[in-house]
Amino acid sequence: MVFILKNNARKEKIDEFIKGWEDKGFSTIWAPGTDHNAVCLIGNTASIDMDAVVHTTDIVEYARRITEQYKAANRTVHPEDTVIDVGGVKIGGGTFTVISGPCSVESRGQILTIANSVKHSGAKILRGGAFKPRSSPYSFQGLGEEGLKLLLEAKRQSAMPIVTEMMNQTQVPLFEDVDIVQVGTRNMQNFDLLKTVGKMKKPVLLKRGLANTIEELLMSAEYIMSEGNSQVILCERGIRTFETAARNTLDLTAVVILKQKTHLPVIVDPSHATGMSSLVPPLSKAALAVGADGLIIETHNNPARALCDGAQSLDLEQFDMLMDDLRLRAGLEGKTM
Ligand code: PEP
Ligand code: MN
């Protein structure tokens, strides 16, 4: 059940209201919004008379039952889009934010060259893997801490916020200056990791699991939010289907459904979804057309020599051309890039 609070509700009254429910054995989630704040009640709420609550307290505007398992992520709790501010860059709520950079940080020259180029093309956030979850233990595993240092140098030089993947809880201290923590597809249901990033005070980019449903993705977001971190960005990055012609199948239906079910921003990763650079531009445009809030695109200064995911990486010129095209289309949709 969710209680949407009146705008003039005083803090002491809200605290008293929350404590009252907690004393009765319910858990609560505080869901702040730009228009209204809300309090979600978790527990067996079947016998609560919603109208009575609305009439006997003077801070509740209205109440709704939420039948879905995810509460804090639910659009019912927070009808307007959540806008996440990443060092001044907005994700969600009418923007189309493009994140770009290499699959993995490979060298100082590589990451600085790519950072400067994608920034010039209009990317707002820089990506780059330092700790890489590879299917084979014999593949390049990323530069680790050294890679993170180089990514942080690229952040300082380019003045772009950065996103990079955290693989486990022990890495938290290394992520102090990282702007967005990525939880990768293979870790979408690593519940300990979700609880850990839920306790961090930074945005989390949560990628959909290879074979997870939309509902499961939302429940993973709920894990993060229930720990107090409401800054979750969802990412559709392709799922496993019977189709083998592309690396994965980009589920654009999920983008539309997610936008209906949750207030959280939803971005698309056409690189991992397809595995082929020639498919990235058309699917990037498709993502914009179905209402995604942005993209995360892999780019490389020399894709043929990339240590990871070269086949799906755009070179810097291809990325620049795609950005010109996206800017035109985003403008027609009334979105700012
Ligand atoms: C990545 O973004 O580099 C990555 C490994 O993505 P995913 O977790 O979606 O495979
Ligand atoms: Mn990759």
Image (cartoon, rainbow, N blue to C red):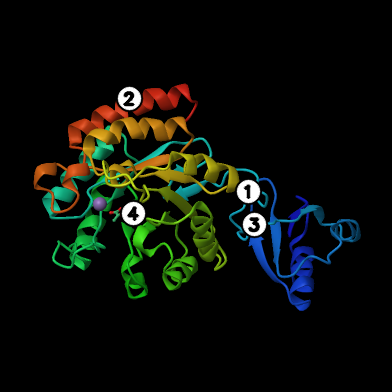
Q: CA distance from mark 1 to mark 4?
A: 26 Å
**Where residue 135 sits: x, y (%)?**
23, 62
Relative to 191, is 261 above or below? above
Q: CA distance from mark 4 to mark 2?
A: 24 Å
**Where residue 327 sits: x, y (%)?**
37, 27
What is the three-letter code of the residue carrying label 2?
Asp
Disc 3 is placed on an element classified as loop
Which residue appears farthest toward the front when viewing the image?
A: 242
Task: Identify the residue shown where x is 46% and y is 51%.
Answer: 233
Relative to 17, is 253 above or below? above
Answer yes or no: disc 3 within 8 Å of ligand 1: no
Q: Nearer the viewer, mark 4 or mark 2?
A: 2
Choose between 111 and 330: the one closer to the eye.
Answer: 330
Q: Which residue is mark 4?
A: 163
Disc 1 is placed on an element classified as loop
Task: Identify the residue shown where x is 51% and y is 35%.
Answer: 94
Disc 4 is placed on an element classified as strand
Q: CA distance from mark 2 to mark 1?
A: 31 Å
Name the image quarter holding residue 98. Answer: top left
Asked whether, in this view, residue 323 is left or right of residue 80, the answer is: left
In the picture, which quadrant includes the C terminus? top left
Relative to 281, is 50 above or below? below
> Which disc number belongs to residue 325?
2
Asked if the residue at tag 1 contacts the one at tag 2, i.e. Cβ–Cβ closer than 8 Å, the answer is no
